[in-house]
Amino acid sequence: MKKGENMAKVYEPAGVETRIYKNWEDKGYFKGVADPSKKPFTIVIPPPNITGQLHMGHALDNTLQDILIRFKRMQGYAALWLPGTDHASIATEAKIVDALAKEGLTKEEIGREEFLKRAWAWKEQYGGRIVQQLRSLGASCDWSRERFTMDEGLSAAVLEVFTRLYKKGLIYKGERITNWCPHCNTSISDIEIEYKEDDGFFWHIRYPYADGSGYLTIATTRPETLLGDTAVAVNPEDEKYKDLIGKMLILPLVNKEIPVIADDYVELGFGTGAVKITPAHDPNDFEVGKRHNLPVIRIMDDRGFINENGGKYQGMDRYEARKAIVKDLEEAGLLVKIEPYKHNVGHCQRCGTVVEPFVSNQWYVKMKPLAEPAIEAVRSGKIQFVPERFSKTYYNWMENIQDWCISRQLWWGHRIPAYYCAECGHITVSKETPDACEKCGCQKLTQDPDTLDTWFSSALWPFSTLGWPDKTEDLAYFYPTDVLVTGYDIIFFWVARMIFSACEQMGEIPFKYVLFHGLVRDSQGRKMSKSLGNGIDPLEVISKYGTDALRFSLTTGNSPGNDQRYLEEKVEAARNFANKIWNATRFVLLNFDEEPDFSKVDPAKFTMADKWILSACNNLVKEVTENLEKFELGVALSKVYDFVWDNYCDWYIEIVKPRLFDAENPTRLEAQFVLNEVLVKCMKLLHPFMPFVTEEIYQSLYKDAESIMISKWPEFEDKYVYTQDETDMAYVIDAIRQIRNIRHEMNVPMSKKAQLIAVTTDAAKASVLQAAEPLLKALAACSALTVQGDKTGISDDAASVALENAQLYIPLEELIDIQKEIERLTKEKENLEKELKRVSGKLSNEGFMAKAPANVIAEERAKLDKYTSMYGSVEERLRIMKERCV
């Protein structure tokens, strides 16, 4: 039985993918082993949140990583793709809090220890879900090395970094304005805020002078914060306020005196020129307050409710208090006017709640000293961004970086290793729990209740996952890593922080390249979101079309840094391609002897077509390899697709069929060899992109074969350089295409053979065409080929094809029955006249033109142009036919 008979008629991914993946994993093909005889190639996965489920962003990100790791593994590198997950402090804590709420409990009621037990139990139950989903994507990670940002080793790394930075004075605790999310009930960093344009108001409020001589009017978008005002500022150069500096005002509704101060912060000519200063609730006001030694009065609690400093408004939500304060101001005659105002308002990226800036005692990382070497690492070229344009975004942020607030008022996460002495108040920072205060020896110590920002541990990911702070074999061999693949939307969150953390802790870059990809948008170009309900579940796509089809569709047309649209028709096309190569393989194997002996192949017997496909495939290998090295993954895949579909399937297989079907053909073995050689190379080039179907085909081609994923990557071979044959075959293919086009235009079936006359004075072209006569007969329905130097004996109306230095002619009477063609063309002309009349009537109808949408009118105009062009062609053809009958 021939090998092809064992292959199903249609490729069914559902029955293949699970089996193949299990075999890969069982055989240990994914494992990265430190091998001194090999070069390492390392990628660390951007760790998905344990709360996450696979979405299109994950699918794209991990497909690109898997392409690179499979490519390098086949090239002979000691390839390691290190997987893991992130503890996602805010998101995970929210899950546990929601679960408790369903039981009628709060986290405070059950206490920290019990809460953490529940969090770890939740992690054990659900945290591995996304890891299993990544397997369904074909991810060839070394799962034996899977890490978690709160596992023992990574937690040790976090403690090491915190204590090191603290001792160097780069971590400090201070009272500053903090971005606070009242819903998540924690501080958040600047880059965890999303700014949206909201409709708001400017409330113009009178602040009476303490001496009763009048009012000073200020405008604010947050009237509730006036409860914490401690001054009103004016610009010292503002002539209309110069005499008021130092004067006292009565704070409305609070009835206490506050001063008018002069500060350059106030912009000349903006608003009323006078600005209320609330040091506890605005970052700019906080700085003004420090310069003028103003009191700092916080008027809200952590939930966004007015606190004890808010007088009668205590206990009100901030927006409820706003309404009450505006009402009271109006009743007191202190509200001048209200103006609508659009402004950018910060929202918590996690939950969407409007962020409340207020003064808080938090832990910070001093960023300026850490940023400088991180900037230099990119500027010097040690780290290269792909595409390079994202370096500008990186520089802009790093050069203007603010200190990083790293403390979070959460329980799930790495607890800050700071201990407060009950006796002297000293803070002891230590990796281990201290027995006593390092300053006074008191044994009554309390650990800081806050945890670290999730990104603090993620920033250490490239080296902590390899065993740091221990000097492990893995760290010495696989670090620094080679490529980081990530979305451009987390340059600040993660990429920048990994770079400065590595420069500080390792004295070395964390990776050599950063490959940025864009977002996967819906078919209309919109961002996928729950609110729009336009998200696409990758697992559903895989179930319907197969993993390879999804991976293919995400990679084709993908260029670094650019967004792309998810189009189901692209996935369908990818599935069709998988079936195309499956059917091609099946055909090849059905036309093989049981085990062809390719050791008997004689290259001297290779035909022009054989040499063409071998040489073209050789060039393909070189180009695809170069594209992959330059991270042009979409370009590489498109080239393989075009070659396999067009050159191999549509041309070469058709060309060699006569040799395959003739058991006595002296070049049959050579045809089989070339089919196999090119097919195997193409499957290897395709494997990183479409791992499952290529593995199944590879196993069909080779008896007892090891996996394609550990086979050798194809290389350019000098023995397969047939430049002239490539040029000659391209010439023949062009001729065949043009002849086919003429036959198609004239509705001549391929069953009707016709004589072909080639006119050329170019001896080389004449030789090529003569050698190609069998191909022209088989593929262009040529009955016979004549090559001559001029047009002697060729009628003027013969159909012609223009080639380089040659003309091909087909006598018209051999192609068509002229009388029948006149009848056909006359009928076609009548039909076109009807269509032209219909379309012209529409476009001249005033009612239609007034009411029809612009796109419909455009379609009708396009039809008019098309039918007019077709009518002209038919008329001209009809004229020629009639002349032939005269």
Image: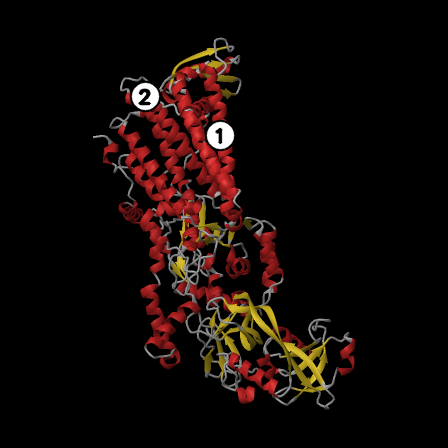
Question: On screen, 860 above or below 87?
Answer: above
Quadrant position of residue 272? bottom right
Left or right, 360 with reference to 236: left
Q: In this rendering, does residue 316 appear at all?
A: yes
Q: Observer-nearest residue: 158 or 492?
A: 492
Give the residue type that dot 2 points to: Pro
Q: Considering only order in the chain, which callout, 1 or 2, is on the residue closer to the N terminus?
A: 2
Q: In this rendering, does residue 674 appear at all?
A: no
Alpha-carbon neighbours of circle 1 within 10 Å: few (<14), some, or many (≥20)? some
Badge 2 element: helix
Q: CA distance from mark 2 to mark 1?
A: 41 Å
Residue linked to disc 1: 871
Question: On screen, 820 above or below 623?
Answer: above
Alpha-carbon neighbours of circle 2 within 10 Å: few (<14), some, or many (≥20)? some
Instruction: Residue 82: give x, y in percent of width and height.
Output: 41, 54
Badge 1 element: helix
User: If the image is split into quadrants, where does the N terminus sit?
Assistant: top left
Q: Observer-nearest residue: 838 or 448?
A: 838
Instruction: Residue 781: give x, y in percent of width and height.
Output: 37, 20
Q: Observer-nearest residue: 337 or 547?
A: 337
Residue at far top of view: 792
Residue linked to disc 2: 658
Q: Observer-nearest residue: 24 or 668?
A: 668
Instruction: Residue 551: give x, y in percent of width and height.
Output: 39, 47
Give the residue type that dot 1 points to: Tyr
Q: Are marks 2 and 1 in contact (CB under 8 Å)?
A: no
Instruction: Residue 433: give x, y in percent of width and height.
Output: 44, 75
Q: How is the image coloured?
A: secondary structure
